[in-house]
């Protein structure tokens, strides 16, 4: 996984998209705003078709797939050839499937025990989710304190005004957020608004 691109983007847009024809215009809008990474979540009926459309376009954006919760989804993402996947939480069965399919992953954790379990499996970067509901920056500091070898991508309830507090933590690689490609802008296909949000994100 290209961790440098994650660090450079700072904010990873977390997007639920259902129309495959919107995939490339959205990616273009983010790139124009300086963001080179996207996390397309599997929360809509046609989510995998959206992922496939962006992959088939051979776009420059780093393509991640989020809300991966089953072995079948892992296998499908691996076949499509996505750059990485993200899980909201990581069971042993799911972790086994990820390893078997050799797909780069940012596994989800919310406790110290879960974080240690991912270290045991060789992961260096994990997703802290749901970040704000799980205690935000203070909890992340507490989890990261005894685990200096681990880096985090906090996601969940993080608004634009919260981003800087997370990015100021040395252990944070980047922050996931849905506000960059917000629902209203997506519904209106207002790509210019999403580019403006992406520019705001990179300025943070």
Image: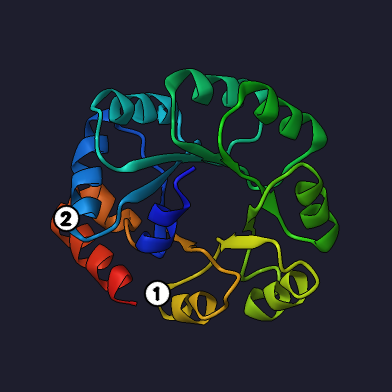
Q: Which residue is mark 1?
A: 160
- Mark 1, other Cα within 10 Å: few <14 / some 14–19 / many ≥20: some
Q: Nearer the viewer, residue 65 or 145?
A: 145
Residue 73's place in the image compared with 22, above or below, is above
Look at the numbered disc 2 and give the secondary structure of its residue. helix
User: Is 34 on the left or on the right of 139, as rendered?
Assistant: left
Residue 32, label in figure: 2
Query: Residue at position x 27%, y 72% from top?
Result: 200
Asked if labels 2 and 1 touch by Cβ distance under 8 angstroms, the answer is: no
Please tell me which residue is depicted at 45% across the width and 72% down the height of the picture: 159
Q: Work out how far the residue at label 1 is from the one at label 2, CA to CA, in angstroms.
A: 19 Å
Which label was assigned to residue 76? none
The picture quadrant where one finds residue 121 is: top right
Q: Nearer the viewer, mark 1 or mark 2?
A: 2
Q: Residue at x 69, y 81 (%)?
A: 138
Image spot of residue 151 (x, y percent): 62, 62
Quadrant containing the C terminus in the rendered view: bottom left
- In this figure, what is the number of numbered marks? 2
Image quadrant assignment for residue 148: bottom right
Give the x, y percent position of residue 57.
23, 27
Tell me which corner region of the image, top left, top right, bottom left or bottom right, holds residue 177: bottom left
Residue 43 seen anywhere in this rendered image of the structure: no
Estimate the x, y position of residue 63 in percent, counting from the top left.
39, 39
How crowded pointer 2 is (Cα within 10 Å; few <14, some 14-19, many 20+) is rated as some
Per the image, label 1 sits on a secondary structure element best described as helix
The answer to whether residue 157 shows anywhere in this view is: yes
Q: Residue furthest right?
A: 113
Q: Is residue 50 above or below residue 181?
A: above
Up-down: is 116 above or below 164? above
Give the mark, 1 or 2, whose residue is nearer the N terminus: 2
């Amino acid at each position: 996984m290209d961790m440098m691109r994650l660090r450079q983007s700072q904010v990873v847009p977390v997007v639920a998209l259902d129309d495959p024809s919107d995939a490339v215009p959205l990616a273009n809008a983010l790139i124009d705003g300086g963001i080179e990474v996207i996390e397309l979540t599997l929360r809509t009926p046609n989510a995998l078709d959206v992922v496939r459309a962006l992959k088939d376009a051979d776009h420059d954006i780093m393509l991640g797939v989020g809300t991966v919760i089953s072995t079948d989804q892992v296998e499908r993402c691996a076949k499509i050839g996505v750059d990485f996947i993200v899980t909201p939480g990581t069971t042993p069965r799911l972790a086994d499937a990820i390893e078997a399919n050799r797909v780069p992953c940012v596994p989800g954790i919310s406790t110290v025990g879960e974080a240690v379990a991912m270290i045991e499996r060789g992961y260096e970067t994990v997703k802290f989710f749901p970040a704000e509901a799980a205690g935000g920056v203070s909890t992340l500091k507490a989890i990261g304190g005894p685990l200096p070898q681990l880096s985090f991508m906090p996601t969940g309830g993080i608004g634009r005004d919260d981003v800087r507090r997370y990015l100021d933590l040395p252990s944070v690689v980047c922050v996931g957020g849905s506000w960059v490609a917000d629902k209203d802008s997506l519904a209106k296909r207002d790509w210019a608004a999403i580019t403006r949000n992406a520019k705001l994100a990179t300025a943070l």
